[in-house]
Image (tube, rainbow, N blue to C red):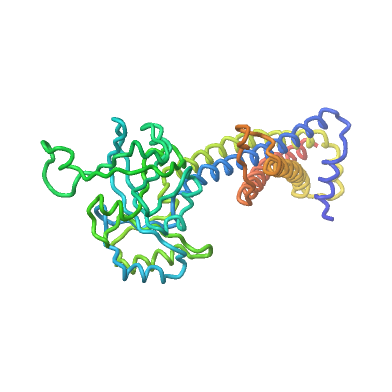
Amino acid sequence: MKFPFYIARRYLFSKSSNNAINIITIIAAIGVFAGAFSLFIVLSGFAGLKDFSLSFSNKFDPDLKILPSSGKTFQFPEDKAVKLAEISGIAGFSKIIEERIFLDYRNKNHTAFIKGVDDNYRQVTQIDSAVSGSWLTNSEAQVVVGNRISRKLGLSIFNYQDLLNVMVPRPGKGQITGLDPGQAFNQEKVIVSGIYSVNEELDDKYVFSNLNFARNLLELDENTFSAVEIKTTPNADADAVTAEINELFDNEIIIKNRAQLNETLYKMLNTENLAVYLIFTLVLIIALFNVAGSIIMVILDKRENIKTLFSLGASERQIKKIFFTQGILMTIIGGAVGLSAAVLIVYLQLQFNLVMITPSLPYPVAITLENIFIVIFTIGILGLIASFIASGSSRKALKAV
């Protein structure tokens, strides 16, 4: 066992004759414990909230989405569809038609987007798990509307007495002023077969229909689509898949992943997480000032011991290293205990739902290696700095003796 480490361990775990030194050391250790504990708890809470928030959009958004580089639509003939299905890493895809529409129901109006989807759509996304009622069938003109749309218009499922009127401006050029709705709009009466609930923004935006219904309503040909949504295999290389898709379409399309489709949400969550981390890092800095203060007080208390060690041949560097090591040990022990306690608390929350937001919804938390490493790195760096600064006082103690 090295000499500085041995002396540092003795100073850390042995009681001082000065009771004030013992109290200051305990307070410093508790501060490190509390800092590590609170930092991991908060980071785990934000990780859980992030997963919880993204879980809703993940039901709706695909792994990859092909969009036109210009305009609203692009050509996707059957021969390209066959080649797309052959690309390694693609588990499935769904052809999409989207356009703005007007909804009319019992003299109530709302502007939304129709999203025509094919039979593969439920294999690409998890939207059907968020639907109350029934998903689309080919037996009749049906739509699935968002929860907010249904509340605004007063819609109910399978109400055959009052059908929902879907209208879209007819394609062409020129003004439609003076024309009656029958001439200016394509319109269809549909039955609401289901109501989905994802989040407020999506619930107020989309109306799902069969692909053929949307195609006929918008008067599009069978090779024209607004997007293609893709589900990748679990171990797929997203960059490689994207490159092959671009090659297939001669780089005439835009491909977005899930994070790019929800760029604003991801930025907001990451910014909040960073802000909270910086705030609690400031708390940790204050806590580690106590470590520095504790080491300085020990140095003052051990001046006679320092003189003896110096007389026995200990170098100035070794004496400084004793108190530096003591600070590091205090940081490691306090941080390790605090982090372990925090991991245990978060684990208990995951297993037993100790804290509830509502009677049926536990507060979301998550244990991630990233957060564990962040806490260890933060505690370690700040502990090193505090211990280095405080151990420098040993030189003044040597000059004083």
Q: Is residue 324 above or below residue 291?
A: below
Q: Position of residue 265 (x, y in %)?
A: 45, 43
Q: Is residue 152 left or right of residue 169?
A: right
Question: Toward the viewer: 234 or 221?
Answer: 221
Q: Residue at x 42, y 66 (%)?
A: 241
Quarter occupied by residue 45: top right
Q: Is residue 295 left or right of residue 251?
A: right
Q: Residue at x 66, y 37 (%)?
A: 38
Q: Position of residue 47 (x, y in %)?
A: 58, 44
Question: Toward the viewer: 358 or 162?
Answer: 162
Q: Residue at x 24, y 53 (%)?
A: 71
Question: Toward the viewer: 52 or 247?
Answer: 52
Task: State whether residue 392 appears in this view.
Answer: no
Quarter occupied by residue 165: top left
Q: Position of residue 180 (x, y in %)?
A: 14, 37
Question: Can you say which quadrant of the picture contains the N terminus?
Answer: bottom right
Q: Position of residue 266 (x, y in %)?
A: 46, 45
Q: Residue at x 85, y 37 (%)?
A: 304
